[in-house]
Image (tube, grey):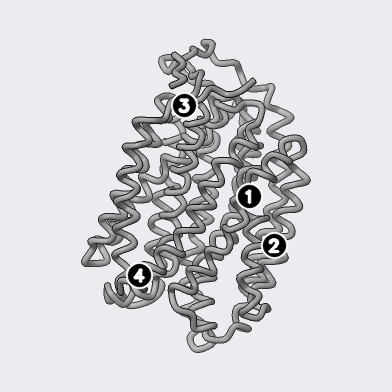
Amino acid sequence: MQPAPHNVRTLWLVGILHAFTHLYQVALLPLYLPIRDDLRLGSTEQATGLMTVMMMAYYLPSYPVGMLADRMSRKALLAWGLFFNGLGFVGLGLSTSYSWAVASVVIAGLGGSCFHPAATALVAGLNPTRTGKALGLIAIGASIGFLSGPFLSGTMAEAFGSWRVPILVMGGAGVVMSGVFALLAREAAVVVDRAVPSIPLFPRAAFAWVFAVLAFLFCCRDFAGNSLGTLGSLFLQTAHGMTPRRAGMILSCIFIASAVSNPLFGHWSDKRRFPWMMGLVGISAVLFAAFPWLPVAGIPWAFVLYGALFVASYPIVEAELMQCVPDAARGRFFGLFITVGGMGGNLSHWITGAWVDQMGRSSHEAGAYRLVFGGLAALMAVSLFGLIPLAWFRRHRGEYPQPAVAAVPMPSRAD
């Protein structure tokens, strides 16, 4: 059975929003040093701290947003979220002080927090039997955003001689796209009656404890994976003397192949997700540890392979998470999951920036980075133990109560 035309259109529109969401998350990576100099900051740590503040604001409200996604229009949440995400970047591009910059990235982060809880639940509702493939398809947008963010910001900053130009352009484009999405996207074909109290997120205490272990272990994956953007940027610019433009181009290599690997691995994993997760994350950890040992010419190719594997693990894990709970709890479940993983994982930007500051002169030597890359790779491997609580949730899904009222079909528009 072919999906309705408006469902396909909505799927692609969500993918475009996914691109903007992650473009904003990586646009600052090549710009830390220019921002530090322009705003006359006292350390690199303050510049990388902007990323941590933005991502904290992004992840902290994920659970409340997940509650809203289970109770109101997911389409409206996505449109307003992108609007404020873009508006925050416009404010950042106009900032004249560090406090102004911090306030702007907070607004951007709060807007971005609307995407994943609402989008993941919306897509899972549209595609109940091919969730991995559907999430893999919208993950193409994430790959495009991750790929274009560092490249565009670094290239435009060098071409115009200012880090502000790319930030303003990206922010304005997001504001415009939020309006396009509001006009053209549609809700899922079925929604739950919002007047009825929702089912409990955790039917009994054991669910909460197992969830805590699950979220913590995958937080280890997120901490290691997120660190590569900031650590890699500083590593390339300090140890190898690269310009922001070249560093941004190499960081973009992480996401070149993921535009293909996300839907491909997502489709293959719909039958057996656990072996795919083990293979993708395990090999990624080995590659992560190898980065500071590689010659400069080999780093871009290693980034391409790493990105094809590691980034593809995200839609697979998300698809499995959506099968752990009924639809009426998906927004809250995923919102709480990424609150834990995101808050802990994105401390990596501030921590790695502080760590590079503490290295002093040795930060200009590639060999000095081997220990930290190896430690982060080990942390990534530890996250594979998260498959155990994930399997537990699947086995106990039947303990969730049924929604109090049956789902209510929405009017279909095939325009």
Residue 410, disc: none
Residue wearing tag 3: 70
Residue wearing tag 2: 285
Callout 1: SS: helix
Measure the alpha-carbon separation of dots 2 and 3: 35 Å
Q: Tag 2: residue type?
A: Ala
Task: Give the residue at x 29% y 64%.
Answer: 165
In this rendering, the answer to whether 314 lies above or below 151 is above
In this rendering, the answer to whether 148 lies above or below 390 is below
* Between discs 1 and 3, the one toward the N terminus: 3
Q: Look at the numbered discs 4 and 1 and tell me whether their residues touch, using CB distance below 8 Å.
A: no
Percent position of residue 261, x then y:
66, 50
Residue wearing tag 4: 157
Q: Camera-side residue: 404 or 202?
A: 404
* Between discs 4 and 2, the one toward the N terminus: 4
Q: Camera-side residue: 110 or 180?
A: 180
Residue 204, quarter of picture = top right
Q: Going by the picture, which residue comes out furthest to the front?
A: 415
Q: Tag 3: residue type?
A: Asp
Measure the alpha-carbon separation of dots 3 and 4: 41 Å
Measure the alpha-carbon separation of dots 1 and 3: 31 Å
Q: Tag 1: residue type?
A: Val
Eye-nearest disc, 1 or 3: 1
Callout 3: SS: loop
* Between discs 4 and 1, the one toward the N terminus: 4
Measure the alpha-carbon separation of dots 4 and 1: 29 Å
